[in-house]
Image (cartoon, rainbow, N blue to C red):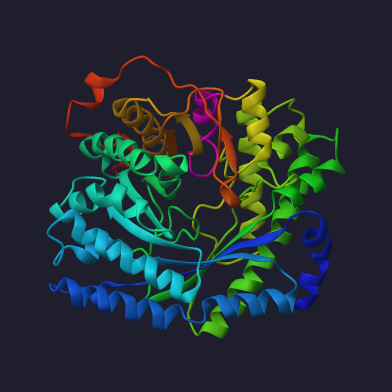
Amino acid sequence: MLNIWEVAETNKMIEKENLDVRTITLGISLLDCIDSDLKLLNEKIYNKIYNAAKNLVSVGDDIGAEFGIPIVNKRISVTPIALIGGAACKTPDDFVGIAHTLDKVAKEVGVNFIGGYSALVSKGMTKADELLIRSIPKALANTERVCSSINLGSTKTGINMDAVRLMGDIVKETAEYTKDRDSLGCAKLVVFCNAPDDNPFMAGAFHGVTEEDYIINVGVSGPGVVKTALEKVRGESFEVLCETIKKTAFKVTRVGQLVAKEASKRMGVPFGIVDLSLAPTPAIGDSVADILCEMGLEYAGAPGTTAALALLNDQVKKGGVMASSYVGGLSGAFIPVSEDQGMINAVVAGALTLEKLEAMTCVCSVGLDMIAIPGDTKATTISGIIADELAIGMINQKTTAVRIIPVIGKDVGETVMFGGLLGYAPVMPVNKFSCDAFVNRGGRIPAPIHSFKN
């Protein structure tokens, strides 16, 4: 039974340990908006989103005020736009027009991001998929709140290397389009393997085609809460460490469950999932890296880091699934560099490299996230980094992703400021040896042998 007393139990977490509901995300299906007339399509998209989401922000604010729980973001996710625009869009600029519509309605209803400027191309690309992908640099440069995600591979289908090669160019082009803002457009662009249909977190949120017409998904976050709990068991055994993380994750997830159910009731929209990811912010004390240090590491990246992160991720999931019947999305520990002060400190100290981050993503949520690299990094090198990360997801039957930012005009050792929840990041070095001949082969990497479960 969820009630206000469970929230009261977490008051200290909220006031002193950075516990918050990171996002309420309203998922909206746009399948019934499909039209061959581009103008009519945009009108339908605007009207459906506006009518569904016009009360989202006020409902979130009311719940936050009533229960004393910070609800940081209110967001929208929609059906992948490559599917919705395929009948009407004949050029990349046609898709850019839809991006403007999404941006306009997002501003009108007051959400900070709208996700779903997306395509699902794990096995191959339709003409509409390719047009949307080629429109991404211009779309992200000319909108404020639109986020884009592309699913390039899965355990069942393998990795679409033609799309991986194209996305290397698109990431680089997006960086160029927004070079006057430290290539900020790339912070709104993520590529996936095994992308979930119900992820509430940006930039990867989209409303999957298997979802209901409308759905409420909530993402909770509390790295500071976990760290504070672990401070009380410093030096204790792994058994005590694990139990402490599980109990803390349970309490954090119960807060998310309460908010999700309340938002569902007030919006008249079905409750989907709670995503119990530990999502850090640049705020001091709200860091996944600091949790790893509390476990006994000098810096994130030291020997033992992957093992510590595996333990943390597993215990968070074990605690969280007992607190909600519908845990979904990504649910684990995020390790974005620019959004986590402890990660930034580890990079500056020389403890954390791109290769170590890649190893860490084998055991946590998502992948290489919010990493600034030199602006002169080749597009093929970016494609190679993407392919490596997707291979981890494909083989291990998990979600992995890349959100990497080649900052035009910046080199290793310089710092780039993104602002807000996106934070700041030191530019990290990239392996300079070529993978051109590999990524230019064309075709796709086939699904692994263990994908055949029928």
Quarter of the N terminus within the rendering: bottom right
Count of labels in the image: 0
In the foreground, 250 or 372: 372
The residue at 14%/56% (across/down) is 91
Residue 14, visible in the rendered structure: yes
Dividing the picture into quarters, in which one does residue 301 lie?
top right
Q: Where is residue 229 in the image (x, y as percent from the top left)?
A: 81, 48
| Magenta run includes residue 354 | yes
Q: Does 103 sit left or right of 237 as displayed?
A: left
The reply to whether the magenta stretch includes residue 15 is: no
| 182 and 314: which is toward the camera | 182
Q: Left of 86 or right of it: where is 378?
A: right
Task: Out of 261 and 323, give the one closest to the viewer.
Answer: 261
Q: Position of residue 243 (x, y in %)?
A: 76, 47
Question: Above or below — where is 427 with respect to 239?
Answer: above
Image coordinates of residue 125 in percent, x first then y, are 18, 48
295 displayed left or right of 47: right
Q: What stretch is highlighted in magenta?
A: 353-368
Please tell me which residue is depicted at 79% across the width and 59% down the height of the picture: 13
**101 to the left or right of 253:** left
Residue at image point 50% right, 52% down: 330
**Residue 94, percent across and down?**
19, 61
The reply to whether residue 398 is visible in this rendering is no
Where residue 142 sits, quadrant-wise, is bottom left
